[in-house]
Amino acid sequence: MHEVSRKNQITNVFEYGHKHVLDSLEKFTNKTFNLKMLDARSFCKNKIREVIGSFSLGSDLTLFKTEIIGDVFGKSYWLVDNHARKYITNTDNNNQVSIDFSYEMLREVDNIISAALISQLSNRFSLEIYGDVPELVMPELKPLEEIIEKDFIKSRENLFLYLVEFQIEESPNAKCLFFWCVEEHKLIEG
């Protein structure tokens, strides 16, 4: 029962953190978003392909990943399609400078979002953790499940997955998803 309660606490930390992130994102962009939690679960590391591959992600995605460093290992994966990129950054595809600038803006947004959630985890579970600088990855080179599988190759623990979508009212087909994969051992034992 303690483990189930603890997993609920982990989920609540992510939910609470993302609600605050949503407010910050709306203020930063002066745009409106809705938050939809898509999944929260524990799973065995050898099930990464099955779990992550079950989500329909589409194509034309940009991926940023941020490593959690310290007492707990994990990563956030932020997937943004071109519709969401243009919406969040107020840029278009008319020139390369605009596109490059939009990626740097998204990196800063990812840094803000990841730092906020990592701080929530740190404070709630008394962990010494911080986030690395977000890394831009072009996922069309590999499926997301392959990227995550490689990132956790050395892990011997079960993982906790939290997946949330920032929905864009003005562009309902846009994709803006945050996957969090965190080794759950220290979170559960706390």
Image (spheres, grey):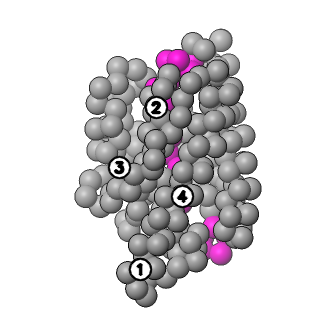
Q: Position of residue 61 (x, y in %)?
A: 40, 64
The answer to which quarter of the image holds residue 48 is top left
Establish if 109 lies above or below 76: below
**Cα distance between the residues tagged 4 and 1:** 17 Å
**Relative to 175, does residue 68 appear above or below in the rendering?**
above
Query: How far is mark 3 from mark 4, CA to CA?
Result: 21 Å
Q: Is residue 133 above or below residue 69?
A: below
Q: Which residue is mark 1?
A: 97
Binning the other alpha carbons within 10 Å of mark 2 as few (below 14), some (14 to 19) or many (20 upward) gives some
Callout 1 secondary element:
helix
Amino acid type shown at disc 4: Glu
- Position in image of residue 63 (x %, y %): 41, 56
Going from N to C along the chain, the mark reached first, 1 or 2, is 2
Q: Identify the image quadrant of the C terminus.
A: top right
- The circle drawn on residue 144 is 3
* Residue count near mark 1 (Cα–Cα under 10 Å), binned few <14, some 14–19, many ≥20: few
The residue that appears at 54% across and 29% down in the rendered structure is 129
| Number of the label disc, if any, that sits on residue 108 | 4
Magenta residues, as a range?
168-188
- Amino acid type of the residue that numbered disc 1 sits on in the rendered structure: Val
Question: Within 10 angstroms of label 4, few (less than 14), some, or many (20 or more) residues?
Answer: some
Whether residue 95 is visible here, answered yes or no, is: yes
- Pointer 3 with pointer 4, Cβ within 8 A: no
Upstream in sequence: badge 1 or badge 3: 1
Q: Given the current orientation, which residue lies at the most extreme left position?
A: 141
Q: Which residue is denoted by mark 2 in the rendering?
A: 69
